[in-house]
Amino acid sequence: MKLNRGKSYFTRLLSACFVAFLFLTTPIVAQDAAAPAVAAPSVSAPPSGAASPEAVASGAAVFKANCKQCHAINEVVVGPALKDAHKRWPNKAALANFIKYPQKVIDGGNAYAKGLYDKYKQYMPNHDFLSDGDIDNVITWIVNESENPTVVATAATGGVADAGAGAAVPEDNSTLNVVLAVLMVVLLLMVLILIIFINLIARYLRQNTQLDEVDEEVLEGKINFWGFLTSTPIKAGVTFLFVIVLAKAGWDKVYAVGIQQGYAPKQPIAFSHKLHAGMYEIDCNYCHTGVNKGKSATIPSVNICMNCHNAIKTESPEIKKIYRAIENNKPIEWVRVHNLPDLAYFNHAQHVNVGGIECQKCHGAVQEMEVVEQYSSLTMGWCINCHRETVVKAEGNAYYNKLVSFHGEKGTKAMKVVDVGGLECSKCHY
Ligand code: HEC
Ligand code: HEC
Ligand code: HEC
Ligand code: HEC
Ligand code: HEC
Ligand code: HEC
């Protein structure tokens, strides 16, 4: 009984230190786990101290699911840039009401809303399917994002920034990480110093004071490390940490649903673009015969492969797969890399033939890829951003020449895709 007292004294002290240490280091772990996400909310506390990180995070999710196709923080997409939007409305309730029922507010005679409508020429859809909590959170996120923008891993999309990715201002939060790391080291040192201190006191007491039996037992009580490791606070702490990391990983997964950037599935035949399009410089159109003619670029049939492989590398096991496909009269089941949802319409001929855009602008340096991967995000923001920035190739096109001269009269500079209707919903949506 007395012995127990001695052991649990040290055990409890150490456990308490360890748990405190865990709590203080959790933000670092969580932040590291968040790093690879495309636009995960930053875990750092907002400056005002009013918004909880959970509210901001769930606001970010609401934004991503419902608003991202039309809005970004710092740029106009389909609707206005949302930076400081909360300051343009009298109060949060008015803003929430507008987000919920924009058409009602615009038609109801709100001068500011009417002004927005006149400028953007379309109603934002109603968001009455969102709960008040969701709308609250998305506003909190907008406020937070206006005040301290999240760092965005700017993926190289051939100079075309993804409007949907949120704040476009690249910012470095490595200083925060350094501070947290230093804090962690300092804490570790403090635990060490504490242990040394306890030892010193024990030795001092033993040498300089008259100890009775009970005190002696307290001092003699060795630190029971197994007891320490299996004590409830430690177990709780470790479980806590584990759950946090797991939840974070799950959250990031949910976040990435729908965006397949970087997707590079294994193909049934080890076909290399690096070899064919890079080293042997075979033209993309030779195999992807649809690019100049139609909607789909098309994947080449085995006949095209056979133009060469009836003679080249006939003994290769990979090439034999082509022969086998022909014998069995079965097409090769290539795994599709790019996949727009059915609701969106994209036409290759429009972009490659009419627009004169190079494959690499959208697909990256395919001629250097051993395995094809999805290079661009293929989000609506991505399409729209390019349509805002790209000047239409009008030379030698009678239809456009007329449009350009008309455009010139209006006093605008270059004619962008926007100006020929590149932002109209119906052009991209059936
Ligand atoms: C289909 C496109 C579209 C979607 C989706 C959309 N908005 Fe909008 N939003 C607009 C347009 C357009 C306007 C300009 C007002 C108008 O004409 O209705 C606007 C205006 C706003 C404004 C006012 C901005 C200002 O400067 O005062 C806010 C805030 C806003 N939207 C938030 C949201 C939020 C939050 C969501 C998601 C829950 C969302 N929007 C979804 C198109 C959209
Ligand atoms: C010798 C024929 C050949 C040539 C030349 C070729 N490709 Fe391909 N390409 C293929 C085959 C076969 C596939 C399907 C297998 C795969 O994904 O690797 C493919 C797939 C692709 C895909 C992914 C399609 C999907 O599933 O979403 C893209 C993008 C692509 N090619 C672009 C290019 C570009 C750009 C060039 C020119 C730089 C090019 N290809 C040249 C044969 C060719
Ligand atoms: C214009 C000619 C041409 C066409 C068309 C072509 N290839 Fe090739 N392919 C080559 C050449 C050249 C090599 C390199 C041979 C070497 O390494 O000696 C090669 C190599 C390969 C290899 C590597 C074989 C190995 O074991 O090293 C594979 C796999 C392959 N091709 C698949 C395909 C497929 C699938 C198609 C049809 C989609 C295709 N090729 C169409 C010319 C072609
Ligand atoms: C403006 C952007 C853009 C350009 C330029 C572009 N592509 Fe694509 N490509 C896409 C998109 C978006 C998809 C997905 C289409 C879908 O899923 O319906 C795609 C899909 C493909 C596919 C898969 C099969 C298909 O047609 O759906 C191939 C192969 C392909 N592209 C090849 C090419 C080649 C080769 C070029 C150059 C000659 C090219 N692309 C130029 C955007 C582009
Ligand atoms: C790299 C820039 C770029 C990207 C990315 C891009 N486009 Fe385009 N798009 C153009 C250009 C340039 C034109 C104008 C072609 C022309 O008519 O001269 C165009 C035209 C169009 C048109 C016809 C517009 C009209 O008024 O006739 C549609 C529809 C379209 N794009 C859909 C899409 C979709 C859907 C996506 C995304 C999946 C997309 N585009 C991505 C550059 C781009
Ligand atoms: C330049 C082409 C383009 C234009 C213009 C365009 N969209 Fe889209 N839109 C897309 C593409 C591509 C997707 C699919 C994006 C994805 O899968 O992430 C999409 C997706 C959507 C979605 C579904 C979002 C989701 O998460 O499933 C809605 C809703 C939508 N668009 C509404 C609109 C409205 C409303 C307009 C007119 C203001 C519009 N779009 C104009 C290309 C376009």
Image: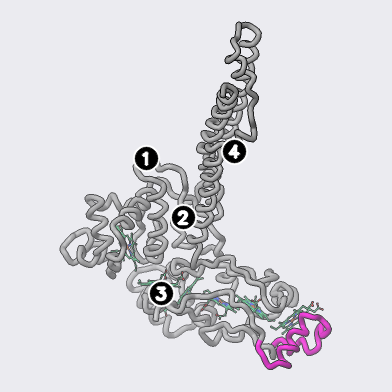
- Find the distance from the CA under tag 4 to the CA under tag 3: 64 Å
Q: Which numbered marker is on residue 422?
A: 3
Of the residues under marks 4 and 2, which one precedes in the sequence?
2
Residue on which the image places disc 4: 230
The kind of residue tagged 4 is Thr
Residue 82 vs residue 226, the one in the foreground: 226
Q: Which numbered marker is on residue 137?
A: none
- Find the distance from the CA under tag 4 to the CA under tag 2: 48 Å
Graded by Cα atoms within 10 Å as few (under 14), some (14 to 19) or many (20 or more), the crowding at tag 3 reads some
The reply to whether discs 1 and 4 touch (Cβ–Cβ < 8 Å) is: no
Residue 96 x %, y %? 26, 56
Of the residues under marks 4 and 3, which one precedes in the sequence?
4
Graded by Cα atoms within 10 Å as few (under 14), some (14 to 19) or many (20 or more), the crowding at tag 1 reads few
Closer to us: mark 1 or mark 4? 4
Closer to us: mark 4 or mark 3? 4
Within the magenta stretch, is there residue 323? Answer: yes
Numbered disc 4: secondary structure? helix
* Image quadrant containing the C terminus: bottom left
Closer to us: mark 4 or mark 2? 4
Residue on which the image places disc 2: 168
Closer to us: mark 3 or mark 1? 1
Range shown magenta = 304-331
Disc 2 CB within 8 Å of nearest ligand 5 atom? no
- Find the distance from the CA under tag 2 to the CA under tag 3: 22 Å
- Find the distance from the CA under tag 3 to the CA under tag 1: 42 Å
Residue 141 vs residue 187, the one in the foreground: 187
Disc 3 CB within 8 Å of nearest ligand 5 atom? yes
- Which residue is pictured at 45% across the width and 62% down the height? 163
The kind of residue tagged 2 is Ala
